[in-house]
Image (cartoon, rainbow, N blue to C red):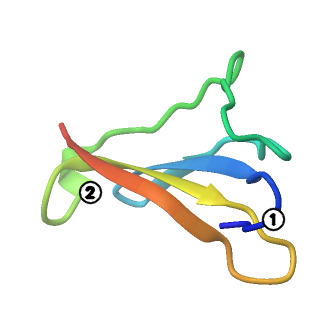
């Protein structure tokens, strides 16, 4: 994460091979992704292993790899 500035967070939702990403909230510590909707098609026949949705939060970086802020896996 950025040490001397605010983060540029975005969220990635994953279900099997499907994934969706929010917009990047520039220079924010607390951001509400209002008016954004995402649809993941849940097909248990295409999911190997556990049946879960992954929610990953990242800090976007321009010159280096994006930093992961946190993640959670939700059983479905």
Secondary structure at numbered mark 2? helix
Looking at the rendering, in which quadrant would you find the C terminus?
top left
- Specify the quadrant of the image occupied by residue 46: bottom left
Instruction: Give coordinates of residue 74: x percent, y percent.
Output: 24, 42
Give left or right: position of 72 versus 17.
left
- Of all residues shown, which one is farthest toward the top? 35
Using a 10 Å C-alpha cutoff, classify the residue at mark 1 as few (fewer than 14 neighbours), some (14 to 19) or many (20 or more): few
Q: Name the residue under label 2.
A: 46
- Above or below, comparing residue 41 to residue 61 in the picture: above
Image height of 37 relative to 44, above or below: above
Give left or right: position of 10 versus 40: right
Q: Residue at x 77, y 41 (%)?
A: 28
Q: Quadrant of the N terminus?
A: bottom right
Residue 32, image x, y percentages: 66, 24
Q: Nearer the viewer, mark 2 or mark 1?
A: 1
Asked whether, in this view, residue 22 is left or right of residue 76, the answer is right
- Which residue is identified by label 1? 4
Would you say 52 lies left or right of 70 here? left
Q: Which is nearer the eye, 45 or 15? A: 15
Distance from Cα at disc 2 to Cα at disc 1:
43 Å
Residue 51's label in the rendered image is none
Residue positioned 44% across, 56% down in the render: 70
Pointer 2: residues within 10 angstroms few (<14), some, or many (20+)?
Answer: few
Sequence-wise, which precedes: disc 2 or disc 1?
1
Q: Where is residue 71 in the image (x, y as percent from the top left)?
A: 39, 55
Q: Please report the residue visible at 32 percent of the width from the left and 50 percent of the height from the top.
A: 72
């Amino acid at each position: 994460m950025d040490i001397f500035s605010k983060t540029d967070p975005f969220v990635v939702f994953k279900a099997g091979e499907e994934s969706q990403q929010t917009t990047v909230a520039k220079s924010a510590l607390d951001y509400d992704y209002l008016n954004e909707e995402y649809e993941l098609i849940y097909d248990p026949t295409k999911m190997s292993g556990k049946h879960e949705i992954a929610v990953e939060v990242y800090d976007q970086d321009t010159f280096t790899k994006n930093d992961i802020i946190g993640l959670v896996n939700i059983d479905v």
